[in-house]
Amino acid sequence: MDASSSPPLTAPSTVAVELAGITKRFPGVVANHDIHLTVRKGTVHALVGENGAGKSTLMKILYGMQKPDEGTIEIDGEQVAFGSPADAITRGIGMVHQHFMLADNLTVLENVVLGSEKLYGIGGNARKKIKEISDRYGLGVRPDALVEDLGVADRQRVEILKVLYRGATTLILDEPTAVLVPQEVDALFDNLRELKSEGLSVIFISHKLGEVLSVADDITVIRRGTTVGTAVPAETTPRQLAEMMVGSELPTPETAESTVTDRVVLEVRNLTVYASGGASLGELGAQPETATAGSSGAPEGADVLTEATSPGAAKRVLDDVSFVIRAGEVMGIAGVEGNGQTELIDALIGLKNADSGSVHFLDQDITPWPTRKRRESGVGYIPEDRHRQGLLLEAPLWENRILGHVTEKPNAKGFWLDPKGAQADTRRIVEEYDVRTPGIDVTAASLSGGNQQKLIVGREMSHKPKFLIAAHPTRGVDVGAQAQIWDRIREARREGLAVLLISADLDELIGLSDTLRVIYDGRLVADADPATITPEELGSAMTGAASGHLEHVETTKPVDTKKSLGAAETVETTEEAAGPEDEAR
Ligand SMILES: Nc1ncnc2c1ncn2[C@@H]1O[C@H](COP(=O)(O)OP(=O)(O)OP(=O)(O)O)[C@@H](O)[C@H]1O
């Protein structure tokens, strides 16, 4: 490891991208300060750093979305100045955003050519080109598949294909593994190796340091807006890398001991939600989601269920789900995204009505309660999508502190809002949760993704909920902040908090949960023991649910693979808790 300022890694002829002396200032913040980055041709170059370190800003500059105040960009040894992403694309820079930008109701081919019709037209030539790229880099993309039928990993491949189609020779991937299971991560890394072997370069932003070390050829570490050094993967451990990012030794996270009690906090009985199910609006200003049939996110090859439908032909997106969570218990739900997690969360917080079944919170039937009443009685909510449901991006941090807690202290005094109380408490949260910001009056939009997440977690934990819905609570936060958030959740759990944890981070699910269940196609299909299961085994269980093969886990109810997926066997039940089989299925 070299902790000094980074010298060029190689001779110029092998350099794809050279960023030198990049400085970018925002009001009150120097996001990038004299940053240097040298990306060699035919390599994967990882960019790591704490939340707010300046990674996204640097990549937005390389992709032409923002202009640097100082510094130069060289592509293939030639200095360039980008006025827009279109300029960057012309010079071979491609960006795969963390949030996919595909049109669900179009085919892969239509999505790929959209906006680039001039390149190869929209017919045979385009199809030929897509096939050629797909074969060359082992992407396995089918041009005529409908995007809404594709799982997360396939959608990501379409995004990669899209930038390659536009001629990218350097691809920027922003936290590409955040939504993938371990097996999918391996497949992605195989794709990246193919790209490398063809001389392309990949810039890879990630907080998962183990993955960074396994896939990267070079690593640049950014701390507080400045390049603090480069690391050689073969000579570096994840902990060393984390300490280089943070600039000090990492705290050792608390050890997890069981705190589960007998007291039932949440009980869900036979909850069923149809895609067209009614919805009640909460006070968050969020529009309730109406899932569409066919958006199951099931692994490729899995047919979309057509039988589990209501008379109105709407798909059953949550199907006879039953469970209890006790005081002091974290119940984790593992599943490939799009298998009913969103509908479960929405039904629990009151953003979607149950079509049948009920939700009981501390012995009260809260099924008909609106969101605000649920929140005021002690349900905390860390939403899946922080931009749509967690924050008002254009409002200052202190107003975001009030969001969802309008009537509660310290935001309200009697009937009136108490801005001073909210402001003082926002300062406390910023301090306690290490939200990197120049102040509480800046907009939520100006915070980095990880710092936005810390603000939401701080807000929700501050109200000492009795039941917490935690959807991806550490998505986008760095390793140090992740350990801190885990500690906060464990601390509250020790005091009796019950938590429903939904996460795509399998280490998080295993590390935090007392009980673990697998969701597939709207049903809880299996239990896993967090004490013994590995992320790889859990990943297999999540994807294996599609084929009926549930290894290393106990099935909670029959998985009718014949009906739903055309497989040959049916796994037998070992537990009755999930309730009787529904005849309609
Ligand atoms: N448009 C903006 N206006 C004001 N400040 C901004 C803006 N964009 C970024 N910043 C600030 O610049 C700093 C760097 O943010 P950036 O998003 O680049 O960090 P990051 O390393 O990508 O973080 P994360 O890992 O959390 O995504 C942060 O302090 C952020 O608040």
Image: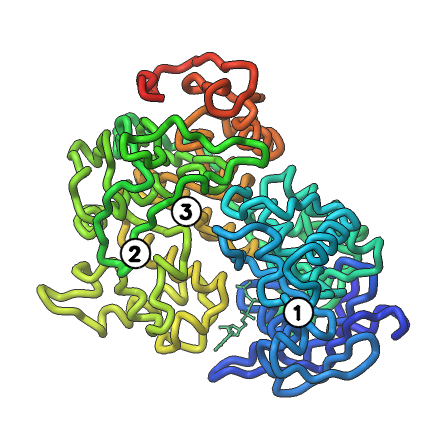
Ligand 1 lies under 8 Å from the Cβ of mark 1: no
From the image, tell me which residue sits under label 2: 287
Q: Is residue 417 above or below residue 273?
A: below
Q: Mark 1 to mark 2: distance in Å? A: 37 Å
**Furthest residue to the left?**
415
From the image, tell me which residue sits under label 3: 471
Determine the residue positioned at 73% across, 77% down: 19
Where residue 160 appears, x then y in whole percent?
66, 56
Instruction: Point out the frontmost of discs 1 and 2.
Output: 1
Q: Mark 3 to mark 1: distance in Å? A: 41 Å
Determine the residue positioned at 20% across, 62% down: 406
Label 3: element kind: strand
Q: Could you classify mark 2 by the number of other residues whose Cα lies within 10 Å: few (under 14), some (14-19), or many (20 or more)?
A: some
Ligand 1 lies under 8 Å from the Cβ of mark 2: no
Task: Say if mark 3 contacts mark 1, CB within 8 Å.
Answer: no
Amino acid type assigned to the residue bearing label 1 in the image: Lys
From the image, tell me which residue sits under label 1: 118
Residue 544 visible in this rendered orientation of the protein: yes
Instruction: Point out the frontmost of discs 3 and 1.
Output: 1
| Labels 2 and 3: the sequence-earlier one | 2
Label 1: element kind: helix
